[in-house]
Image: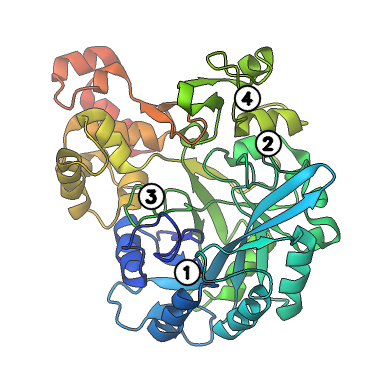
Amino acid sequence: MRPLFADFHFHSKYSRAVSPAMSLEGLSSGAKKKGLGLLGTGDFSHPLWFKELKGKLTPVGDTGLFRLRTDANETLFTLTNEVATFFSTPQGAKKTHHIIHAPSLEVVEQLNDVYSKMGNLMADGRPMFAKTSNPEFVEKSFEVSKDIMIYPAHAFTPWFGAFGSNSGYDSLEEAYGDQVKRIKALETGMSADPAMCWRMSQLDKFTLISNSDSHSNHPWRLGRECNAFSFAPGELSYAAIRAAIEQKDRDRFLFTVETPPAYGKYHWDGHRLCKFSCSPKESKKLGGKCPVCKQSMTIGVEYRIEELADRPEGFVPPEAIPFKALLPLHELITVLLGGTLSGKKVTLAADKLMAAFPSELDILLYAQATELIKHTDEAIVEAILLNREGKIAVKPGFDGEYGVPQLPDYLKSAKIERKSREKKLGTTIPKVQKSLDDF
């Protein structure tokens, strides 16, 4: 049985720089294409979005989950939000983004009443609370309901991550003070993955979560990072999801899906305007200065991990929830065919493949090569299988620029001669397909 894939963090059409397709209907449609069975709502504090949530969602029994009243896709929703807190300290301004999960519309309504006194909820889908410390925000939220969840969003990104290089902290105890007892999880963000976080022993007691933070419902955005759960029939509920996360229940929280961290926008240090980036080791030699303009670079996530790590690379805590590294299908096809993610030739190739399988996640994770080859080029099939094994290198992203996938030279063309391919692989194609089918 396939897992239940869930993406809890993204933004609605009421947030800045977000596609108008990020309506409830658009989200449900995008979830079906991707293979997501459960979505957060995002932005539940925005008055107009909350009005839509109340008007268009219907409860699924007493589970604390919802469906669209007129939705044939049967996508489940759980109530979520992201907020930003800003607080001045002797060490400078601290800016942190947080994810909130709520068990009911009634609780959301009470939370929004509290939040309306912290900031202007109409200003953006992600409300910004100036002069509000992290502990104050958490304490006031839990005063409304003990059944909510709060955890730091994209915890290592430079400006708004709890561990960010520009305004973050060196521990969650420092970030949340006496309220850290209520923080049970942490969102890794695209520029980090669990393997990087496992190097920090201080994070062992927190469950690592992955979400897309998407601004559109395209399958290369929505669900690009997500969480895989398994629940017994009749067991699925808000409370069961919360318990699986907070208890780090490996029987129910199976794994996370992660893009390779180098694909994220802030993995390496760099300066976008000068088109310069470098590893943490090189950045230290440069004193954090761009060699082109001599200005300070944006210090990335890998640098911060290196600063805070107390374990070697490759360490895996015994109770860690595993993960799978995957690039979106459209990224693979774009590298092979050229063009853009939404370009005509990439779209045609992706649509043909996706029409033959239940979803993109099914293609990326489960479909056998012998079935894939019936619907697409051999090079695309091999790219999918290499992707499934985590064997695609990525030129690291930096300072707001996405990383760039680097496929092997023999896959650069979507039309490859069989003999040439077999020579490169050192084996026959049927053997390669059989071995990869068994993955």
In contact (CB < 8 Å): disc 2 and disc 3 = no
Element type at marker 4?
loop
Question: What residue do we see at 64% from left, 81% from top?
Answer: 113
| Residue at which label 2 appears | 165
| Residue at which label 1 appears | 41
- Amino acid carrying label 2: it is Ser
- Amino acid carrying label 4: it is Ser
Q: Earlier in the sequence, mark 4 or mark 1?
A: 1
Separation of disc 1 and disc 2 at Cα? 29 Å
Q: Nearer the viewer, mark 2 or mark 4?
A: 4
Separation of disc 2 and disc 4 at Cα? 12 Å
Separation of disc 4 and disc 1 at Cα? 37 Å
* Displayed quadrant of residue 167: top right
Separation of disc 3 and disc 4 at Cα? 30 Å
* Displayed quadrant of residue 202: top right
Mark number displayed over residue 296:
4
Q: Is residue 275 above or below residue 185?
A: above
> Horizontally, is 336 left or right of 62 in the view?
left
Mark number displayed over residue 97:
none
Element type at marker 3?
loop
Q: Position of residue 419 (x, y in %)?
A: 15, 15
Q: Position of residue 163 (x, y in %)?
A: 70, 42
Element type at marker 2?
loop
Q: Earlier in the sequence, mark 1 or mark 3?
A: 1
> Horizontally, is 187 left or right of 264 in the view?
right
Q: Is residue 305 above or below residue 233?
A: above
Mark number displayed over residue 221:
3
> Horizontally, is 121 left or right of 37 in the view?
right
Question: What residue do we see at 44% from left, 66% from top?
Answer: 38
